[in-house]
Each structure stands twice: as C-alpha cells, then as structure tokens.
Image (spheres, coloured by chain):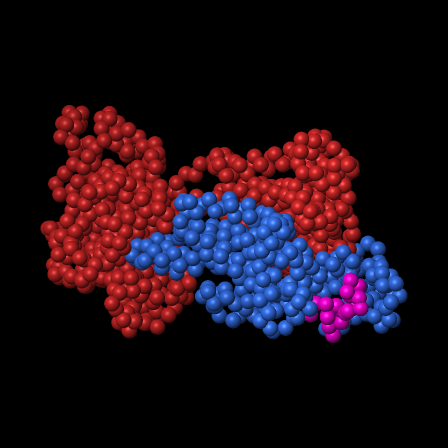
Amino acid sequence: MAIQPAVLAETEPAEPAAGRLWLRALRKPLTLTGVIITLVFVVLAVVGPWIAPYDPSAVSDAATAPPSFAHWLGTTQNGQDILSQMLYGAQASMLVGLGSAVITTILSVLVGVTAGYLGGTSDELLSLLANVFLVLPGLPLTIILAAYLPHSGSLGIILVISLTGWAWGARVLRAQTLSLRKRDFVEAARATGERTSKIILRDILPNQLAVIAAAFLGTVTAAILTQASLAFLGLTDVTQWSWGTILYWAQADSALLTGSWWWFVPAGLAIALIGTALSLVNFGIDEFINPRLRQAGVGTKKAQRAQVSRTRTKRVKRAASRRSGPRQPRPVGTPFTADSTDVILEVRNLKVNYGAVTAVDDVSFTLRRGEVLGIAGESGSGKSTLAYAITRLHKPPAEIPQGEIRYTNADGSIVDVLAMDDEQLRAFRWEELSIVFQSAMHALNPIMRVGEQIEDALVAHRPGSTAPERAARVVELLGIVGIPADRANSYPHELSGGMRQRAMIAVGLALDPEIIVMDEPTTALDVVIQRQIIDKIMELKDRLGFSVVFITHDLSLLIEMSDTIAVMYGGKIVELAAAEDFHQRPQHPYSRGLLESFPTLSGPKRELSGIPGSPPDLRRLPSGCAFRPRCPVAFDACAEHEPELYQIGSSQAACLLYSSDHAVKIGETA
Amino acid sequence: MRTVLRKLGFYLLTAWVAISLNFLIPRIMPGDPASHLINQFHGKLSPAAIQALRVLFGQPDASLWTQYLNYWHSIVTGDFGISYAYYPADVGTVLGQSMFWTLALITACTVIGFVIGTGLGILAGWKRGTWLDSLIPVTTFLSSIPYFWFAIIIVLVFAITLNWFPLSGGYSVDTTIGFSGDFIASALYYAVLPAATIVITSVGGWLISMRNMMVTTLSEDYVRLAEAKGLSRRRIMYKYAARNAMLPSLSGFAMSLGFVIGGSIVTEVVFNYPGLGTTLFKAAQAADYPLMSAIFLLITVMVLVANLLADVVYVFLDPRTRES
C-alpha cells in the first residue's frame, strides 16, 4: 500500500503586511526613542550654524570658563564658545556619517547584489575581495590613507571611510541576494525573460530594504566614530569644526589637566548618543528581519509561568517518592484491542490560547496502553499545538487556561501533568513520555554525536548508571532501530535522512517511555524511507508495548496504522472513532470530505472531490460550527449552536446532524 | 584540517593584498610622498638609505613592475627603511620595542572582553524578558562611546581626580624593562586603565550579538527536544543553546577584532602607552611613511594570525566543518 503524499492543505499562517510590521517596530519604545534622538540630531545638524550663538572660532576673554548663562557649555582655552562648536561640529560629523553611509551602501549594494545575482566566477572573485577587505584592519588603513592626504576635508574622509568600509554590507547583501534568487517569484521572472536590471530593481532590491537600512545605519555610526578618531588624532583639517576636532583641541590644550571637563564631555556624549540611537533603531530592524528575536526563550520566568497560567491545586494524588527509588516496572500489558480499558493518558477539556486566539479548544480524549491514536488535521487545526501542550513544551504566548492531562503511573496512581512543578516535570519527561519531531535534521543537535544525544537522556534520568552501562544501552538502542553501532560516534550531518529519523526514534526510546508522541515523523522523507520508518515504528510498538500519539495530515497513512483516529478542525476534535469505523463510515461532513479527496486503496474507482474553501482563520472563527462555511449539508441552526461530540454507534462526531433535536428537523426536511 | 588549510590560503592572499596596497598607496597618492619624505630628513640620509626609501615609496625612474619586484625584495629581507619620527632608529627596531606592549594588551583585553561579553550574552539571551534585557540599552551606549573619549573620562576620574592609577605610560620610570617582579607589577598597574577602557567598550558588541544568537538558537527544535528529554536547565543552556549560538560569534571574530584594534590604537594614544597605537600616531603626525606602513603590515599579520586561531577553535567546536 502506497502512502499518499500530503493530502490536506498545508498553508502558512497569514503574516500581516510588511508595512504594518514596520509600524509595529516603531511602537517599541526603544526603537521609537532611537528614531526620535536620530531625528533631533539630524535637525540640529541642518540648522546648527544658524542657531549657534557665536562664531565657533571667535576668541574672547572668557578663557576656559565653565558653563554659564552666556556660554551654556562653557568656553575653550581661547574663549571660544563650545556650544557653537558643537552645533557646527554636528553638521560636519553628521555629514561625514551620512555621506560615508550613502557611498558605502551604494558600493555594498553594487558588489553584493552583482555577486549574488551573477554567481559563478564573478561571485567568487567579488566575495573574495569583500572577505579580504573584511579581514584587513580598517582603522590602521584609514589612518594611513588619511596621513597621505594631510588635513583633508570632509570629502576626503568620506572617500577614505567608504573605501575601507563597504565589505561587510556587501557580504550580507550577497548572501541575501543568493537566497532571493532561488525564490519562486524571481525564478518566474527570469523564466519569462524579464531584463536583469528590472528583476534586480523590482524583485530583489525591495526585499532587501531592511538589510540595506541596517547596513546603512551601522555605517553612519561607524563613520561618525572613525571621523572622530581621525580628527582626534589630528589627521583631518583641524580648523574645520567637528566633534572630533573639539576633542583634538581639548587634548592638545590639556583640558584634562586643567580639569575643564565641559570641554570634552559634550562631544563624546553626542557621539555616544547618536551611536546608541542608531543601534536602537537597528535592533528594531533586526527583530523585523529575524522574527525569532521577538519570541521569548525557554529560560525566562515569564515563559515558565506562562506554561500553565493558573496555580493548580494538586487534587490528584501523586505517587510518593517517585524520583528516589528505581522506576517501578509496569506489568506486561496485553496487546491492544478495541475493548482495552487500560487508560494511560487522559486529556480532559484541554484548551490552549495564543493570546486572544484559541488554538486548541476543549479537547478531550483517552489513550490506552499499546494504542495508536492518530490525530489528523490541516495546518492550523491545532494538532501540533496539542502535541506540544501534552508535554508542556508550548512556548509563550501559548498558555493553557483550562484542562487536565492525567497520566497513570505504573503503580496505578494518577498525576496531572499540568500540576507538576519543574522538577517533577523534568523527571516525567522522556521517562514516561517522549517525542519524535518532524525533522530530525533540526531536532538533533548538529554539534553533538548521535550517541551522546541518546546518552544525555540516560545521564539525566539514571544518575546511578555507569558509563559502560550507558554505552551498552546506546548500542542496544541503535540496534533496535537498525543503525550500526559504530554510528554512535557520527554527527547528525553524517547520517542519511532516513538514518537520522531512526536515530531520532532511538533517542525517543532511550528510557522505555510509555507514550511516544510523533509529530509528522515521516513527512520530510521520501516514500520508500517513509515506509521503512513506519514499519519500524509499528514493529517496535508491538515489541516494546508503548502507546503512540501519531500526528499527521496524511490520512491514508493514519487509517493504516492507527487504532483510533481523532480529526481536528479549528482547534476542536470533530470526530473520534476507531480507524476501521472511520474509514468505512465517516460521520462528520468534514471527515467525509477528507476521505473523498483522496483515492481509496481497495474500494472501487470513483471521482475524487476536494473540500471547497480554505482552513478557518482561528482569529475569526465563524459562529456556531467552525466548518459551516465549507459544509455541504449545513443548515440554519449550524450558525447558532456549537456542536458537541455526539455518540453515533461506536463513533463520536461534533455535528448538529446528530443532535437529537436536529435529527428530527432533518427528518422533516428530507 | 582542509578547512584550516583553505583559510590559511585565504589569509596568505589577504597578506599579499595588504602588502600590495602598501606598495600602491604612496604611488597613487597626489604629490610625491617619496621625495617629500626624503626632503624631511634634510640631507641627513646616506645614499643607501635614500635608495631604500625610494624602493619602498616610489622610484620615478623605474617601471611599476620593477618597483614592485624591488619592493618585495625589501619586504622579504625585512628592510622597512629608516624611521623619521624616531631618527636615526630603523623601523624594525622601533616596532620591536612597541609591538609586545600592544600584543599583550590587546590579546588580554580581547580574551577578557570576549569571555565577559559572551558570558553575559548567554545569560541575557537565556533569561530574555527579565531585568537582564535592560542591559541592552546600557551596553549599546557603552559600545557607542568612542574608545578614546571613554579613556579620557577614565583618566579624569581614576588618574586625575582619585589619583588611584598613573596618568600615562606603560611602566614606572624607576623600573627597568626585564623579567623582574618589580617591572611586571608596575606594567600591570599601568595597564589597568587602558585595559579597562578597551574591555568595557568592547564587551557590549559581544554581549548583544551573543544574546541575539542565543535567542535565535533557543527556538531551534533541538533545544526544544533537549527540554522534552528532561535534561537539566544547565545542560540545555550550555550544551545545546550556547555552544551552537557561539559559532556565528566566532566566525564574526575578524570584524570584531578589527574594531577592537582600531579602538585600542586610539586608546593607547590617550594613555601614551608605549605600544603600536602611540607609535602609529606619532608616525602619522610626522608623516613618517616607513613606520606607518610597517605598522599597518604588522597589525594585519597579527589580525590574520588571530583569525587563524579563531578558525582552528571553530573547527574544533563545529564538527560540520571537519568533513573531508
């Protein structure tokens, strides 16, 4: 039996338009502060010479006077007004900053985009050139260039800074262009024979604006700093006022020794302030480019608190001293049958919210020993969120406002996973319940040997074990999943895709867990390897007796391997049935639609039909039944009542067709 | 190993570019730097010394290619000419005296700055969303401060006002340079303020890049899996998150080092520290081209060696680069 490729629509959740993201970045107080300070400096630089109270070079009798009403920032040794020097200096410093940034950015874009777009030899040569300039120490080179052009004005400095500073931006932009070039819309434009210049201007550059802006702002800061350094060293025209020249004269006239702090403090502060402001703006841009920076990490208090939002009373009895003694072996279970009552995990009324959006809504199910529970659903149906919630691996802003996850220990006692404290949770994880992720490539630590990644679960949970014992267990586990023992010393990138996924399963089996949650464990693999992995999972399940929660959008695979199937739609379970019943007699209109949208494996040939419409937007769920807008048999009451799960024979379906009132109505209309 | 060899090749190429730049710059600059330089000595130079300077900074009577070959001959034989600022010492002697000061100062400061900054960055990334986030604007401000200005403020506070540390120099004049306890203690004492300046202003850059990489790494699947495995927080933080997050920091070492060196040069000037920075400053002021270009070459070589070391560490930390 062949495994069907993706049947259900896998769509990315819609991102808000880019323009709105920019505005959101501005709403961050730090970014906004940065923007405001930058604007203030730009305005000062423009109007500086007009609002300066004195001629910055005019000498007066008030030598080295501290700040006073006449001279707000005091005077120099020659009685020059420092405020006026600062205002004139703002112009020179900002001019050098902005001018260098403009030229540098143009150079970076030219080199970076050309290299990335053309590829081949020109890319190699240009990248090499950029890398060489990146490694050459910039400031010494700048100093030398400036020394050969003694007392050069702003233009010379701008050229020198641009010449030494373009490499970094070019390298970043090249990498960006390279990845953009492979995107569909650029490939499409190339295929239709668009002119190269047009593609670059229309398709590539607009998508790099954020990176270009970041490089530009970074260069402004660096250029202002470099100019100040050069001026301070006396390598620019010291009669032209800039913040650096103020510091040069302060140093030359020993302002430090005479204690005239007002002479050198303002210029340094101004440089530091504008640099900070631009960096703050850049952090905003960084978060815009790299959305991960907006998410919270595992370690934060907030993250830990948010995992379970309300403090729970520990109503459920915990097994005493579970951690101290060795793990109690569970009596060998009988193979799973439809009549099994040996419940290992019971989820009751579980709800997971992302802020105001409910991703998993009032979900209940039971998992019995040895059972394979298949959870099917489109992207955004809440199936992966459910998987993470069961193990409490969900991250803020996800939180669980309601529900219970009751796990039955070996001694028959029952614990609520959501009520565990950190240490209990740590002990519970992997020992009782492990997870196999979709992509082993991403789920295995790239810089640790495979064996070590199995072993560290053993170290964490079996503190008494010796190294040889653990090594033997690693070899045993690799053997179980069919990986040669010497591969324990391999790194993940050295294994093939199928072998990596097996290694992932070996990690999951390390502590003989009772439950393994598998989140699309074969989606990333090709069909033949998929088949091998599935067969291996089923073989191991029968041999080792664990239960499986198997999550996928691949319905035919699910029907083949599951004992029980739960179909999720809009965060709810809409049908829960034995796999056979589900296959033969799907009850929910959505399930019927799903089964009709791919070929049956044994039945007669028939026309395939999809489900009209697209998966629901969880932020704007329709009233009543979430499936109503796409449902071929919806009726008026569907807009008013949220259906609960109704019992139909041995199946359960959340559809008003099966409610006692509406069954009558349908009978009338039919 | 192959990665390291490829890198070595790249650094050799960079060294060649640096040397060729050094050859080209005086020859494409306006005016005639070579004659200007020779005139500065007011006839104090021997014909041989003049010839040596001509080879380094421009021989109007020879073709560019011949000049280039002659230039290389001088470089290979270690003849960098006579220093004008430190006349009659030749460039090699001047550099020999100053380079160890800079090497010791910058090596120590880079290592300390990297360790502190990366350590704090790991913590700030791990505990994102707590008070540690307020470190960001503070360190941003610290790293936006011009090194030399921070040096001035430090001198004002700790040397002039509080009088805790010496104002300038590299060691007390009443000790003699050598491997004596007195001298080393004195050198360390004099190095405190310059070192503090460089470390404090460079920590921010490491901190912020490490924090951002840490936050990015924390949302990787392998960190989530480590958490699912019930590993201790310590192990997740170091072995899974930090070790992976550190890799980009190391590969960005070159650029950061460039900033640190640039900053240290100017810092040295403020403290009148007897290292390459102060020497370069004096050379630039006196238009002492032989000394300047030799310092540039020397600093380039130091940067390249440091980068090569960083690459070796990188290969050691990231098995993916060890592929044959």
Q: Is residue A247 magenta?
A: no
Picture layout, residue A198 above or below residue A1: above
Image point 28% across, 43% down: which residue? A308
Q: Which residues are magenta?
A: B77-96
Q: Residue B101: where, in percent of width, then height?
A: 63, 65
Name the outermost residue toward the right. B43
In the image, residue B62 sits, relative to residue A5, either above or below, namely: below
Query: Which quadrant holds the C terminus of chain A?
Result: top left
Residue nearer the viewer, A281 or A435: A281
Total count of labels: 0
Q: Can you see residue A303?
A: yes
Find residue B86 and report its horizontal and vertical position in percent. Answer: 77, 65
Which chain: red?
A: A
Q: Which residue appears at 14% of the width and 27% of the height? A: A661
Principal secondary structure, stretch drawn in magenta: loop
Place residue A48 in its image quadrant: top right
Q: Quadrant of the N terminus of chain A?
A: bottom left
Above or below: residue B186 compared with residue A547:
below
Corner quadrant of residue B18: bottom right
What color is chain B drawn in?
Answer: blue
